[in-house]
Image: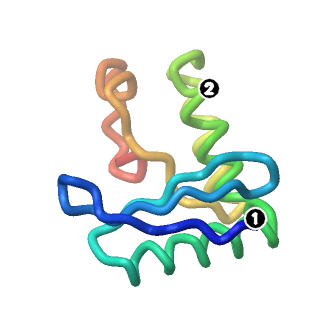
Amino acid sequence: MAKQKMYQRPDGLYEKKLTLGGKRVVFRAKTQREVMQKIAAYQERKMRGPTFGEVADEWWEYKEARLSPNTVSSYHTAYRQAGGRAFRRTGSERDHGHTDPRMA
C-alpha cells in the first residue's frame, strides 16, 4: 500500500484515497483521526472476512423486494432463530399489512 496524502475538501471533510487489494477505496470524515479509524476498521473487516450478519443484511437488501409477504415472514423467523438481528420493517411490509411489532 503506497502512502497517500490526506487532504481537506472544500466542504470541510477530510479525505484519503487508497488502493487496497487492487480496489480504490475512499475514506471521508470530519477529522483526520476519524479517517484513520475508518481505514483501520476497513482493514480489520477485510482481514476477518464478512460476518453472517453483514452477508445476511446485504442479501436481504437485494432480495426483500422480490419476496411475497408470507416468505418475508418465514425468512424473518429463520433469520432471528439463527441469531441475526430482526429485519428492518420496510415500506412493502407496511403495504402488505404486517402488524407484528417484532418486524419493526
Q: Give the answer, above or below, for where 84 lies relative to 94.
A: below
Seen from the viewer's position, the closer of residues 100 and 32 is: 32
Q: Which residue lies furthest to the bottom in this view?
A: 33
Number of numbered callouts drawn: 2
The mark nearer the N terminus, 2 or 1, is 1
| Left or right side of 29 for 37 | right
Q: What element carries label 2?
A: helix
Image quadrant where one finds the N terminus: bottom right
Determine whether label 2 and label 1 are within 8 Å by CB.
Answer: no
Q: Distance between the residues labelled 2 and 1?
A: 24 Å
| Residue matched to label 2 | 63
> Residue 31: image x %, image y %?
31, 77
| Left or right side of 36 for 63 | right
| Residue matched to label 1 | 46
Q: Give the answer, above or below, for where 69 lies relative to 37.
A: above
Residue 60, quarter of picture: top right
Q: Is mark 1 on a helix, strand or loop?
A: helix
The residue that appears at 58% across and 16% down in the rendered structure is 66
The amino acid marked with disc number 2 is: Lys
Seen from the viewer's position, the closer of residues 49 and 67 is: 49
The residue that appears at 20% across and 53% down in the rendered structure is 10
Q: Give the answer, above or below, for where 51 lies relative to 35.
A: above
> Residue 8: image x %, image y %?
30, 64
The residue that appears at 66% across and 50% down in the rendered structure is 79
Residue 78, can we see it? no
> Residue 51: image x %, image y %?
73, 63
| Left or right side of 61 for 50 | right
Seen from the viewer's position, the closer of residues 20 and 7 is: 7
The residue that appears at 69% across and 71% down in the rendered structure is 43
Residue 97, quarter of picture: top left
